[in-house]
Amino acid sequence: MIAELELAATIAASEPAAPAATSGAPACDLDAMRNERVEDGGARKDETWSARASVYNRGLTLMGFSPEVGVVHEVRNTNAQLYDYERTSGELRFVRQF
């Protein structure tokens, strides 16, 4: 039986993009709408962390595909409390090695 384990981690920090200016349309203060959910009234800042682990067995196949089972854990820390979250999810994929 041949089994492989894959581990990966990702870290991303971002700030929301500024709204594009449009001519002839009524002004909408999107920055004010974003900042009303930020405690200090400043710009929203996000930091997202994710970790993924998966395992698959190339010895087990179904029509040439091997099952791969994975788990993903993701955390977003932000100064806009509404968008803070932490979640864990599972994945089932069928992969084919070339």
Image (tube, rainbow, N blue to C red):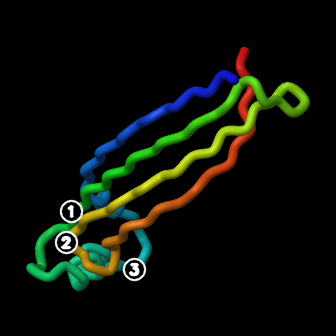
Q: Amino acid at mark 3?
A: Pro
What whole-number distance in Å separates the C-alpha atoms at marks 1 and 2?
A: 6 Å
Query: Which is nearer the N-term, disc 1 or disc 3?
Result: 3
Secondary element at image label 1: loop
What numbered label is drawn on residue 8?
none
Q: Quick one: 79 or 96, which is closer to the camera?
A: 96
**In the image, residue 53 lies at what x, y percent?**
48, 42
Q: Quick one: 79 or 63, which is closer to the camera?
A: 63
Query: Which callout, 1 or 3, points to the residue nearer the camera?
Result: 1
Q: Amino acid at mark 2?
A: Asn
> Left or right of 39: which side holds 75?
right
Picture residue at 19% right of the left edge, 79% below the top? 38
Give the residue at mark 3.
Answer: 26
Query: Which is nearer the N-term, disc 2 or disc 3?
Result: 3
Query: Few, some or many C-alpha atoms within 10 Å of disc 1 (few <14, some 14-19, many ≥20)?
Result: some
Q: Quick one: 13 or 42, which is closer to the camera?
A: 13
Identify the image quadrant of residue 41: bottom left
Locate the N terminus and report the quarter of the image it occupies. top right
Residue 1 vertical position relative to residue 26 in the rendered view, above or below: above
Give the residue at mark 1.
Answer: 45
Picture residue at 29% right of the left edge, 45% below the top? 11
What whole-number distance in Å separates the C-alpha atoms at marks 2 and 3?
A: 29 Å
